[in-house]
Image (spheres, rainbow, N blue to C red):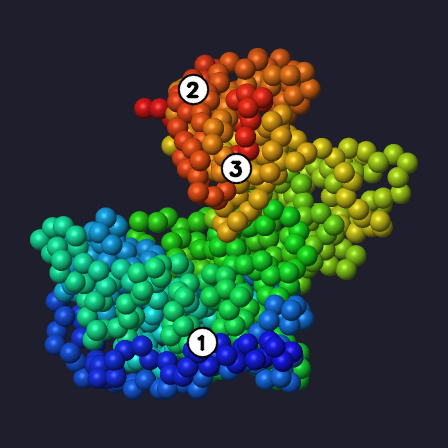
Amino acid sequence: MNKITLTLALIIFALLGSGCADQPATDSKAAPPSGVAQTGAPATKPAAPVAAKPAAPAATQTVTPVVAKPAEPAAAQDKFQPTMDSLKQYECPDWFRDAKFGIWAHWGPQAVPMDGDWYARGMYEPGNKHYKYHLEHYGHPSEFGYKDIIQLWKAEKWNPDRLMQLYKKAGAKYFVSMGTHHDNFFLWKSKLHKWNSTNMGPKRDVVGDWQKAAKKHGLRFGVSEHLGASFTWFQSSHRADKEGPKAGVPYDGANPKWFDLYHFPAEPDDKAWYSTNPKWHKQWFAEIQELVDKYRPDLLYTDGGVAFGTNHAVGLSMIAHLYNNSAALHKGKVEAVYNCKQKSDGRWVEDLERGIMPKIEPYPWQTDTSIGDWFYNRNWKFRPLSWVVHMLVDNVSKNGNLLLNVVQRPDGSLDPEVEQMLKEMADWTAVHGEAIFGSRPWLVYGEGPVRARGGHFKEDFKYSSKDIRFTTKGSTLYAIALGWPQDGRITIRSLARPTGQHVNLITNITLLGSRAELDWNQTADGLVVKLPAQKVSELTVGLKITGDDLKPVPFVQVYEPIHADDKGNFNLRADDADLHGTCIKQETRGVHTHIGFWDKSDEWVSWLVKFDAPGKFKVSAQCATVHDGAEFAVELVGKRAGAKAAKTAAKDAKRADVPAIYKRLAAKVPKTTAWDDFKNISLGQIEVTQPGEQLVTVCAKDPATWKAINLRAVRLQAAQ
């Protein structure tokens, strides 16, 4: 680190000061009230927990907050310093690149109501489903708050050793324990924070017990921290109802006695995901440093981007601390992985929440997702095994990993259907694991009619046996079809043998899980493999291919049209659009993608849509512009106006006899505060008179008066 950077870091940390507790000293030993233990509920249609009004405070073990040593910059001799330049030295360890599949226990006291994610916040927000549930089953949050929910969490059926055996058999190579969620309740034995699982709730070191089980069964171990966002996330607990019989009565979080759980009040303008409060920054660093130093995890996950931003030394210092500690433990080699939801260029492993990447990434990455809600939710159905397997295969083909939350009940057990899914996953990995674990991407990730452009919160795709994904090990190529074909044939266009070209000289093909000899034929159009009559798996076909000069042959991929959702609506997103022009392009900011750089009036976008039946639809669009008087049009067409555009549209629609424009709606875009300030604009109603494939396009209303807009989505909502 140069002298200027070191001096700046020292100033920042000096300003943060020392100490870690945010509660008044006089309240530091106050014990939370004891609650009513939740009894085990049946696996199907569980009864709601019965709550009692909190009893008088019980004599529980208390922890006097420890004044932590001030967070300091990395020592000058350490390899990693808290700067983006220094972190560029990082190289993802081979264990993570080989592992491919991890299981996560996103579990804690918020599972108790069995009402889903973000309960601890939603119970303090009138109008939120959690608030309604809390009133009905526990009472008003001024009288029975989240501190009392914590006392109901007993984890009485939790057996980490047994669960870890199931996870290992299912193919998991690493395991991640929740360290703390946004609820500010720690699942480790903390000396800094009394609200932890060894003092209350299950009275167990959850992180420590998970780690012992992971090590025993040979899995790498990680922890997730969601604490950075907790300060602003939990401020709803300080408020009060604005109407009703309890209007104006403060929730329990407003009582200074409980600030050690609910935090001290934030400044009025401190509302972002990450707080700007230096006192909170200091506390976060001390507490996550305790977690990292106590358990020495192989992986640390942060729920968000780099904590408090890359322009702030605190979050970068934690990453540098993790890496330097790992290097010290492994003779100079960094074995630790840091996950966060931010592009890294290799500085850490980028994580996508409930989403995938659209292509092969040069650096390893990870999806974190769940087979259900994040915390146990009695109203959610679990994902099928096919969804898990297909996401795993797709991620691995693109240089990614899958971290899967296996949802636990409040008592720590799994529902029977979840255990069955894990057993079936074990059967699948026993056969197909050689194409997954320890593999690397090929030159292309795959082929097929489903267009999976990816991004956060985009994980639902209807794959079929026509969707192929590739992985490699050395000179061996694996082709995995995402389904078993009804006709018993797999066609792989990328492995064609073009006339006169010395490529794809295949010598042998075998089917994973079968000893049957395969009949296969290679032409200029593709490789065709005839499968045996007996299916190996309903989920996939795994082909092991050897030969010389195996290279993907370019071809024109025909994609599936967009179908209506289960409510009959069409959601036409920017990242699913076809762009027509040289300047217009897609941009992603945060979790959203939009179409921008739309400066030319003759450029336009389109979606190929499949209407299953005639109907009427209300049309709306999400747009932004900094210009006055911007206007655009949404058209339902077969051909675009203009000879060149019409040919392009007809080709896109895969039809030569499509009709001309038969419906056009136009609208003005009100001037917005910025290019990313999107507004929903209603354009009117459109009628589809016959089923079939049609193009929906967005273009200039009048090219002569066009002004640039950004477009996030178009929605066709079925009219009632």
Q: In the depicted view, which residue is nearer to us: 491 or 33?
A: 33
From the viewer's perspective, is 431 left or right of 688?
Answer: right
Q: Where's the C terminus, which quadrant?
A: top left
Q: Nearer the viewer, mark 3 or mark 2?
A: 3
Q: Which residue is mark 2?
A: 686
Q: Quadrant of residue 683?
A: top left
Q: Residue at x 37, y 48 (%)?
A: 381
Q: Looking at the picture, how far across and down is residue 382, in whole percent? A: 40, 50
Q: Is residue 646 above or below residue 92?
A: above
Secondary element at tag 1: helix
Q: Residue at x 90, y 36 (%)?
A: 500
Q: Quadrant of residue 418?
A: bottom left
Q: Which residue is mark 3?
A: 710
- Badge 1: few (under 14), some or many (20 or more) residues near its Cα, within 10 Å? many
Q: Where's the N terminus, which quadrant?
A: bottom right
Q: In the depicted view, which residue is nearer to us: 181 or 85?
A: 85
Q: Is residue 642 above or below residue 53?
A: above
Sequence-wise, the earlier of marks 3 and 2 is 2
How many angstroms separate mark 3 from mark 2 (CA)?
23 Å
How many angstroms separate mark 1 from mark 2 (CA)?
55 Å
Q: Amino acid at mark 1?
A: Phe
Q: Residue at x 77, y 60 (%)?
A: 474
- Badge 3: few (under 14), some or many (20 or more) residues near its Cα, within 10 Å? many
How many angstroms separate mark 3 from mark 1 (CA)?
39 Å
- Badge 2: few (under 14), some or many (20 or more) residues near its Cα, within 10 Å? many
Q: Amino acid at mark 3?
A: Asn
Q: Which residue is mark 1?
A: 285
Q: Looking at the picture, how far across and down is residue 35, in whole percent? A: 18, 71
From the viewer's perspective, is 20 left or right of 146?
Answer: right
Q: Residue at x 66, y 51 (%)?
A: 360
Sequence-wise, the earlier of marks 1 and 2 is 1
Q: Amino acid at mark 2?
A: Ile
